[in-house]
Image (tube, rainbow, N blue to C red):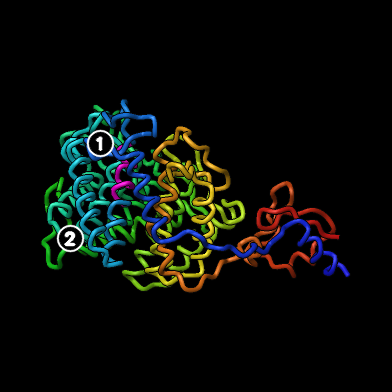
Amino acid sequence: MKRQVLSLLLIAFAGFVHPQVSYTFTDEDEWACYDAFNDAFLDASKSIYKLNTETARAVDRWNGAAAIWCQAIYYDMALNAYQRAAKEGDEARISKYNTQARRIYEGEKRQYASFNFNDNNTNTGWFVYDDIMWWTCALARAYEIFGSQTYLSYSESSFCRVFYGSQKVGDTGSYADPEKGLGGGMFWEWQPIDNPKPNKAGDFRSACINFPTVIAACRLHQLVPEGRTAPTSAYPNRQTKEFYLEKAIEIYDWANKTLVNNGRVADGIHGGGPEFKDHLYNQATYIGASCLLYKITGEEKYLNNAKSGANYVFRSMCTSSILPLETGIEQGIYCAIFAQYMHMLIYDCGQTSYLGNILRNIQRGWNNRDKVRNISNGNFLRVTPEGSTIESYPASALPSLMLLFPIDEVTEVEEIPFEDSAQNDIFTLGGQKLKEDATREDLSRLNSGIYIWGNRKIATR
């Protein structure tokens, strides 16, 4: 009898089954969404991106330009548009987005110290390690797509700038060399910016530098030629194929052990325990790093980790599988990064069961967009008011998803019902964990009371 009552209460409290979603957006809608994003936010005179819809010009950091690291994500979007056009064999769009990607690259280079990563001026220069590493990743992709050696040279030199430090700036580099007692992983920043002190073991090592470093190292391992001689300089501008993979695995192992708990990624560590605060981009880069190492090594543990990271997002960070919008400084862009690496998990790693959850987000976002401008404020659960001021960061969420998941390629959709997942922990209302990966059978054995299962209150009698 107890189990029977429990079943009824689960239905009353949880509402586990998603209603069937009807996908009404089209391939042309997806292109229109991306073009609308560029119409709203790309400064055509400079070919870099603006802060918001009210900004007339993207002058610099203090006057209308989007953040330097977010510009790399927007460049990734341009690369995605070109790749999709090429895959679809659309000659007009191939030409259009090839030209657009080239102009954006040239505009970004002009804006940001000609990609001199040793220029640490705080307006148009480089002064945080992860800002540089996001561009390392984007430029590696540009080389992979277009084949220009210039892209690879900048990608490698920026990676080495982060890893080893800069003789000009005077910092000691992001790598927390365990052989020097620094603890492993990657430091987030150097301080002070103008006259850096050496990093110490207790300095901040964040997920947002560690997992992008793994992604960059994996991409460079895949791209650079065999047979290079290992550099002997204290400040090299490139490394060997073997080095990139060795460091990718080493840094991933440290970060996975130190910053991840059952798929949940901590924001970082200062020297004590990991500091858990959920951010979609940390989950995203963990997924991406795991996918790339799985593709390179074939080891299932990496794929399992990627799925664990994705599962945590949909199970613990979403509302009815709709992705969260973070509203802090520059945080609205996190969904665009999540889209990039979920694409890798779904298509490159064959995990198509997540596709329905992604398409659910696209449909909700498209339904709730500002239908005059075809842009969204990133909160897919609410209608974007027509004519409202929108930042480019959250506005990137919908076009990023729509570019990467073409509806015309979808033949069959399976949606994972995360709210009904058997892989959920049981907690008391006071936060005490009673059972990991609990099933309904486990719930039926509990004493009468109210518990938390899968982020929902469950009553048992």
Residue 345 in view in this figure: yes
Residue at 34%, 64% (x, y): give it.
Answer: 292
Which x, y percent locates residue 396?
40, 46
Q: Which residue is mark 1?
A: 126
Q: Which residue is mark 2?
A: 240
Which mark is nearer the camera, 2 or 1? 1
Q: Nearer the viewer, residue 213 or 378?
A: 378
Image quarter where the N terminus lies is bottom right
Which x, y percent locates residue 311?
54, 61
Q: Amino acid at mark 2?
A: Thr
| Numbered tag placed on residue 252 in the rendering | none
Which quarter of the picture shows residue 44? top left
Q: Nearer the viewer, residue 406 or 151?
A: 406
Segment tinted magenta in the rendering: 67-76
- Left or right, residue 145 beside residue 306: left
Which quarter of the picture shows residue 106? top left
- Left or right, residue 288 beside residue 141: right
What secondary structure is marked by label 2?
loop
Image quarter where the C terminus lies is bottom right
Residue 175 in view in this figure: no
What secondary structure is marked by label 1?
loop
Q: Amino acid at mark 1?
A: Trp
Residue at 27%, 55% (x, y): give it.
Answer: 79
Q: Sort mark 1 into few (<14), some (14-19) or many (20+) by Cα contacts within 10 Å.
A: many
Which x, y percent locates residue 380?
53, 48
